[in-house]
Image (spheres, grey):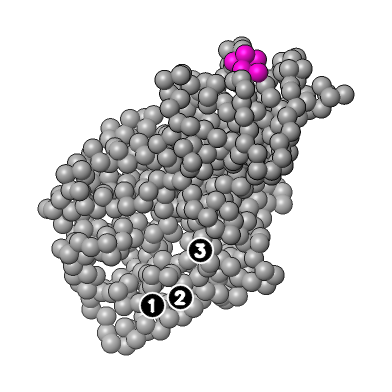
Amino acid sequence: MAIEQHYQFLQNVTPFDRLPESQLMAIAQTFDVLYYPKGEVVELSEPCLLLVIKGVIQEAQDAKVMAKYANGAYFNEASLLQSETNRSAVIQYKVLEEAILYRVPQAVFLETIQSFADFKAHFYSNIVDKLNAWHQQRQQVAATEVMMEAVCSAPIQPLVVVNADASVSEAARKMVENKTDCCLIDLGDLQESQDTRWAILTSTDILRFTAHQCERDSISSAVEFRARDLANKPLQTVHELEYLFNALLKMTRFQIDRLVVRREKNNGEIEYSGFLHLKDLMGVFANQSALVLLKIEQANSVDDLAELSNQLDDLVVTLHLKGIKVHYIAKLINELHRKIIQRLISLLLPNDLHSKVAVMLLGSEGRSEQLLRTDQDNALLFVDDLSAEEKTQLLDFSVAFNQAMLQLGFPPCPGGIMLNQPTWRQSQSGFKAQLRDWLDRPSMESFMRLAIFADAQIVFGQATLLEIQRKFMAQRLADTPLFLRHFAKVALQFETPVSFFGGFITRQSEQGAVIDIKKGAIFPIVHGVRVLALEHGIQECNTHWRIKGLMDLGVFEAAQGIELGETLNYFNGLRLDAMLRQKDNAAPGEDGDGALNNDVALDDLTHLQQDILKQALQVVNQFKSFLQQHFKLRELM
């Protein structure tokens, strides 16, 4: 019976769960069971791997706490894997809570590593491979997530093609025959470019046109109009192997009900194979709460929008628990945030001002990386020739907007980076002067404000207003290259919470030993990539897209770029886990969103999560070294 218990225990411990049953049973037969009371030190009379059945073990190196191990964790593997020359640190394992351990002989552990590639990969693979395995494991535990299936797995409506000169009635007849509600219009030689050869005609287009003709008593002639007269361009397409998740994202972004599905022929040419319809996508997603958010455009009040906004956190939790990578979740959530904010502005801003302003999202919102509504960062630009009355209207709007954002669940920015503040609500010339001042007088405050503005994205209004400011900033940066070097130095201001020997550097809080994941891990990557993007004129704001741009330019080698992106994903995932725990632990009725911090408690992490975190923090240190070398930062210190 004892051997069977040992075997069942190993089945639930990563990476032992990757081994075949025969090997698990063989290892289980070698177990020794050890008992340690609280306060005792684990003395190792011979090299071995130790697994925790019960209790908590603290690892310290040279008297500094490095890690804690609880039920299901293992420890001392490093001493078995590294050479004698690397064993310079004095390691001590202390029992914090009464403990029962399994001991695996060194020979058995090393033989298993050499005999089973998947098991060995866990200890020797790079951070990217470990993170991919981690995400796969989460997705398997949560069952298959339909949103991450390919478009071709969903119901695809048949492709119907109609000649440009066909009548509207003929197009409608073909749609009915094929039981679909849209068709492609082949414009053929009527267009010079192959890219504009195709257009789309939908049943909605025909209904609207027919209703218009009925009002004019010309329904008899309406059906004889040519299909090309009603067709819409350009086509919005999706590849048949793209995620359904991204298909929903695209429909949400463009406010459309269908996408044309494309694929490659054997000769590499693109062809269209059918239509993916929103109603079919909704059927596939079944009860996914994302579908409720498609009602945004129907909202007629702030209360309506608040009801939709409050569902976003639940959607984040659902997707995160299913193991979907954080940057995919962020893409969808931020697209929906923007739709809500756009609708809010359209409800609050007088129509005659729509063409005279640009409302911007800044910081993590601008980068499309905000997951929970932790704060709001926004700004407003307006043309120089507004009348006094229009300026008064804008002031009223700015106050109403930020108040409404509070109602939508976005707490105020602690730094006052909101468009109801004069610094962040300015005319074109006024903000240009503000930019010039920040660039000409470097300080930590100006660095912070420039970093926030560098991530600005238009959410409503005239994009040209922001483009003018971007061009001005780019030119000033090109004229003063030393500024970017000092700007890059900001990425080094926080200590990476990992020691030379690979242990965690923590501080104590009510949660126990914690690290600030934002300051110590996320910020150095986000800001370092931001500065590199500014240096090379990359217009993207999202950190992952900036990394891709830097890879394309050869600034990052492919492996380095992928490693940075996956590492950032992991940090953001841990941060999200920690914030969700804080929300769950908030007192009933307490709105704690604005008080969420960035602390990750080591006690909340599994052994595997801690192992990956240590390796990920080393990636941060390597990136800091890259920045120091690239910008020659040691010369500035």
Residue positioned 28% across, 32% down in the render: 554
Q: Which residue is mark 2?
A: 402
Looking at the picture, how far across and down is residue 480, in whole percent? 13, 53
Q: Which residue is nearer to you in this view: 286 or 527?
A: 527
Q: Judging from the image, what secondary structure is the residue with disc 1 in?
A: loop
Q: Residues in magenta?
A: 105-110
Looking at the picture, how far across and down is residue 307, in whole percent? 63, 69
- Camera sees residue 464: no
- Camera sees residue 502: yes
Q: Residues within 10 Å of mark 2 (few under 14, many from 20)?
A: many
The quarter of the picture where the N terminus appears is: top right
Q: Which residue is mark 3?
A: 374
Q: Judging from the image, what secondary structure is the residue with disc 3 in?
A: loop
**Sequence-first tag of 2 and 1:** 2
Contact check, label 2 and label 3, Cβ < 8 Å: no
Q: Residues within 10 Å of mark 3 (few under 14, many from 20)?
A: some
Calculate the distance from the C-alpha at mark 1 to the C-alpha at mark 3.
Answer: 18 Å
Contact check, label 2 and label 1, Cβ < 8 Å: yes
* 1 or 3: mark nearer the eye: 3
Amino acid carrying label 1: it is Asn
Q: Which residue is mark 1?
A: 420
**Sequence-first tag of 2 and 3:** 3
Residue positioned 36% across, 39% down in the render: 621
* 2 or 3: mark nearer the eye: 3
